[in-house]
Amino acid sequence: MTFSDQMGRTIKLDHWPPRRIISLVPSQTEFLADLGLEKEVVGITKFCVHPAEWFQQKKRVGGTKTLDFQKIDVLKPDLIIGNKEENEQSQIEFLAQHYPVWMSDIYTLEDALDMMRKLGELTGKTEKANAIAAEVDKQFKPRRFLKPTRFGEEGAYLNCTPKVAYFIWRKPYMAAGSGTFIDDMLRRASFENVFGNLARYPEISEQQLADAQPDAIFLSSEPYPFSEKHVAGLQEICPAAQIQLVDGELFSWYGSRLLQAPDYFAALREKLDLK
């Protein structure tokens, strides 16, 4: 059978559904687990920490960008699942010479939903995948994250879009810009990305941050593990900004973890109390 991936590539499976899958992306690994592919998934990366049982029990084939080809060969996969951004192009091209490699390419919620449905078809789990995608789509509804006014009038909402800087790295500071899944999540959570005019993951100087005057600064838990010790330095740059450590998985994982994201975003807005 032949299937198309999100990069427009066509892959051929000698038998379907596949029986020996290697997943190279943490968020997609978790999604495959939620599809019930316990026996079929034989390999994951060292960053595929969910579900915990898989992280402990499944064979690991290196990092997302440092794949161990020998370990992959030993597992004899009949399908490898990766992602354009999270995996290295040269490594994927090498693997594709030897195995069917299906690639996702995700920048928006719609892309994530499309990935879920396509992986459902690819793995023989269409019904379950479509159900998860439908529930995620249902959770992300307009106005869900807008706070009621302080007076609590029924049906009244604040028409505010707080300006936010979302940092993913330190030394140098790097932020999520346009054309990223994080940027799409910020928008859907009713935040304005102050660096949305810059593409991808730009380096940000202290002066750029000060000039942006964000209402809030989000410090992600991944890929850089920001902690409380990093707050003070940024507070000096932006004294008026509220600085919050945030769960990077809920802003950047585009699998079934998205089911948890809307409630998290709503709680985050309440916690910040942004007007």
Image: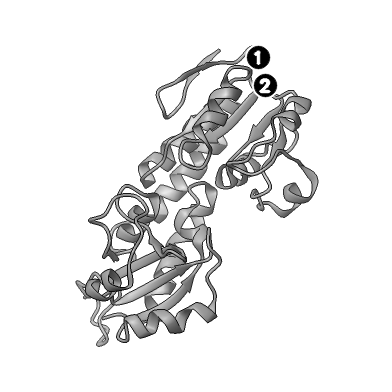
Task: Say what amino acid the circle numbered 2 marks.
Answer: Asp
Query: On the rendered structure, is 51 left or right of 252?
Result: right
Real-space Cα distance between discs 2 and 1? 8 Å
Q: Is mark 1 on a helix, strand or loop?
A: loop
Mark 2 or mark 1, which is nearer to you? 2
Which of the two discs, 2 and 1, labels the residue nearer the N terminus?
A: 1
Residue 241 position, x and y percent, is: 32, 81
The N terminus, quarter of image:
top right
Residue 15 is marked as 1
Q: Are marks 2 and 1 in contact (CB under 8 Å)?
A: yes
Residue 222 position, x and y percent, is: 53, 60
Residue 167 position, x and y percent, is: 41, 65
**Residue 9 or residue 153, whichever sits in front:** 9
> Badge 2 local density, few (<14 within 10 Å), some, or many (20+)?
many
Residue 57 is marked as none
The C terminus, quarter of image:
bottom left
**Residue 275 or residue 214, whichever sits in front:** 214
Residue 154 visible? The answer is yes
Task: Say what amino acid the circle numbered 1 marks.
Answer: His
Residue at (68, 40) in percent of width and height: 44
